[in-house]
Image (tube, rainbow, N blue to C red):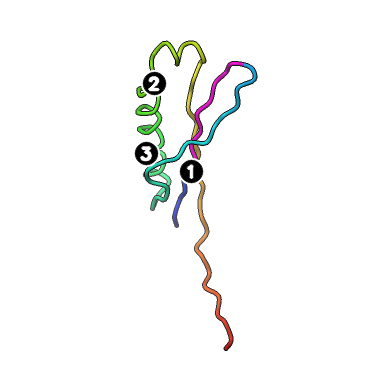
Amino acid sequence: MEYLIIMWLCSTVPGNECKQLPTEITEFKSHYDCAIYGYKSSVTTIESFDKDFINEYLVYTKFMCVKQEPKQETKQNI
């Protein structure tokens, strides 16, 4: 079973929407690996911004690990 990570950068300031973040790694073999990556990536992301920016816009990250069902191969009749 594989898991995909989806991450967002958010602000609690009214009118600001969460923006999806690209991640270097997108697929994981376990939920554990995905969750650990998500938390570590969140720390790295927050630390990459200026402290004043984080405090002014009340920035935070969120992520989720989504289980992917195995892909079924389709047979084509020739």
Kindly identify which numbered label has been placed on residue 65: 1
Mark 2: amino acid: Phe
- The residue to which callout 3 is attached is 37
Question: SS of the residue at dot 1?
Answer: strand
Q: Main secondary structure of the magenta part?
A: strand
Question: SS of the residue at dot 3?
Answer: helix
**Magenta stretch containing residue 3, yes or no?**
no
Q: Earlier in the sequence, mark 2 or mark 3?
A: 3
The residue sitting at 45% across, 16% down in the picture is: 54
- Residue 48: percent from left, percent from top: 36, 24
The residue sitting at 42% across, 47% down in the picture is: 26
- Residue 71: percent from left, percent from top: 51, 65
Question: SS of the residue at dot 2?
Answer: loop
| Residue 45 quadrant | top left
Mark 2 and mark 1: Cα distance apart in space: 24 Å
**Image: magenta residue range:** 5-13
- Residue 40: percent from left, percent from top: 35, 32
Mark 2 and mark 3: Cα distance apart in space: 19 Å
Mark 3 and mark 1: Cα distance apart in space: 10 Å
The residue sitting at 49% across, 20% down in the picture is: 59
